Amino acid sequence: MINALYEPFPESVEVEGKACPILTDFRDWLRFADLMRDQDVDRYNKVYMLANWFEVRPKKITDETVSALFDFYSAKQLEPDACDDDDADADVEDSITRPPVLDWRIDSRYILGDFRRYYGIDLIGIDYLHWWEFRCLFAALPDDSQSQKRMAYRAIDLGSIKDDKERARIARIQRSIAIPFYGCEDDMISAAFGGLIL
């Protein structure tokens, strides 16, 4: 885990022991997410297009290259290191595939408004914002922000609501803000590429 307060955000990923400079602006990584979710782009073309996220196009895209890009996208180094947990229930819970609560494209107008309202940041006009800084700011949006509210509503388990009227109200909201479900983000690599390497 890095400390975002004083450690610089990475400008490269490591592939085969070498630092490979990559694009780091938040817009580039929102495009990356859109590409991975695009059902109209086949696996071969997705792999081929990954080279566009490097400042110098690699000669080939390997499993390690793909993993490095996905690790950067997920910003795993911003999260606390996973502690050793022997709880089998936690492992089962983590392996359950759930519909997403966030889609960068579907929620884009709310994210745009929230950044302007809470941070005074114009995401359209800003020259540059590192993807990981964007992720930090997004994660810190308050619970009353539109983005966080939408995520919270999507995450509600209707089966846990006892009151019929409240359950029906939440179900209506969930239907109105639903995200098409193609699989979970953790499976994006295998779903998108299935071992296809260039």
Image (cartoon, rainbow, N blue to C red):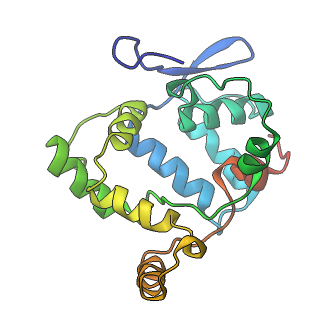
Looking at the image, residue 132 sits to the left or right of residue 126; the answer is right
Q: Quadrant of residue 158?
A: bottom right
| Residue 161 position in % (x across, y down) | 52, 75
Look at the picture and state if 15 lies above or below 32. above
Q: Quadrant of the C terminus?
A: top right
Q: Quadrant of the N terminus?
A: top right
Looking at the image, residue 180 sits to the left or right of residue 145; the answer is right
Residue at horizontal 47%, vertical 77%? 174
Residue at horizontal 36%, vertical 38%? 134
| Residue 40 position in % (x across, y down) | 64, 69
Q: Quadrant of residue 37?
A: bottom right
Residue at horizontal 71%, vertical 47%? 94
Q: Quadrant of residue 81?
A: top right
| Residue 63 position in % (x across, y down) | 79, 34
Q: Which residue is nearer to you in this view: 4 or 80?
A: 80
In the rendered picture of this protein, how many numbered marks are placed on residues?
Answer: 0
Q: Which residue is nearer to you in this view: 97 or 183?
A: 97
Looking at the image, residue 27 sits to the left or right of residue 90; the answer is left
Looking at the image, residue 20 sits to the left or right of residue 136; the answer is right
Look at the picture and state if 126 lies above or below 124. above
Q: Residue furthest right?
A: 195
The answer to whether any part of residue 15 appears in the image is yes
Q: Which residue is nearer to you in this view: 61 or 100?
A: 100
| Residue 143 position in % (x across, y down) | 31, 52
Look at the picture and state if 118 lies above or below 192. above
Residue at horizontal 41%, vertical 12%? 7
The answer to whether any part of residue 122 appears in the image is no
Look at the picture and state if 106 lies above or below 46. below
